[in-house]
Amino acid sequence: MTSLKLSLSTPPKKRLNSVIIIDDSSTELQMAIDYFSKYPGLKTKTYATGELCIKDLVVSGFVPDMILLDYFLDSESPGSKDGLEVLVKLAELCPTSEIIMLSAVENQRVIDLARRKGASYYIVKGAAGYKKLDEIISKDFIVGG
């Protein structure tokens, strides 16, 4: 009789060298930049709309390690795609990227939709949200090169 050994192992950590932040609020973008500045050598790039980000990714072929994406993206550019529409395209363009919705919207229906459409995590903005982001980074990533 042969024995079968089962092991529950955690997946290996990914490298975190690059982050894209998509938010239509310049204040929120600056807060995210300030947050990531504690990781020397980490490249960050910001976009005010999902359309600008998608266009840039298509042209450059660049695939970031992490994408932080807001849900409401139309305060500066009315008619812009919302975060869920952008999420679907980003998941297609960047299948290896960790996509995290970072939003002020705390609605279970939106959270469930985001997870079904490709978000790895959904974080509500604020101090607790950045603490959750710290937990995700320390659990899932090795930062820097």
Image (cartoon, rainbow, N blue to C red):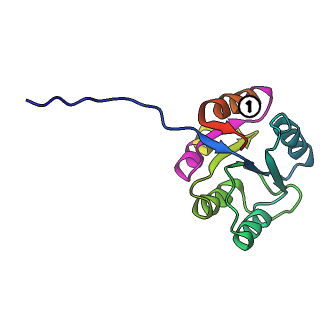
Q: Nearer the viewer, residue 11 or 81?
A: 11
Quadrant housing the C terminus:
top right
Residue that carries the numbered disc 1 in the rendered image: 129
Identify the residue at horizontal 74%, vertical 70% (top origin).
Answer: 60
Report crowding for label 1: few under 14, some 14 to 19, many 20 or more residues within 10 A (C-alpha).
Answer: some
Does the image show residue 138? yes
Residue 106 on image: x %, y %: 69, 36
Whether residue 116 appears in magenta in the rendering, the answer is yes
Position of 25 with respect to 123 (left or right) is right
Q: Amino acid at mark 1?
A: Gly
Residue at the left extreme? 1
Placement of 1 over or under 143, stated as above or below: above
- Where does the N terminus fall, quadrant-wise? top left
Q: Quadrant of residue 46?
A: bottom right
Magenta range is 112-129
Q: Residue drawn 92% across and 43% down? A: 27
Which element carries disc 1, helix, strand or loop?
A: helix
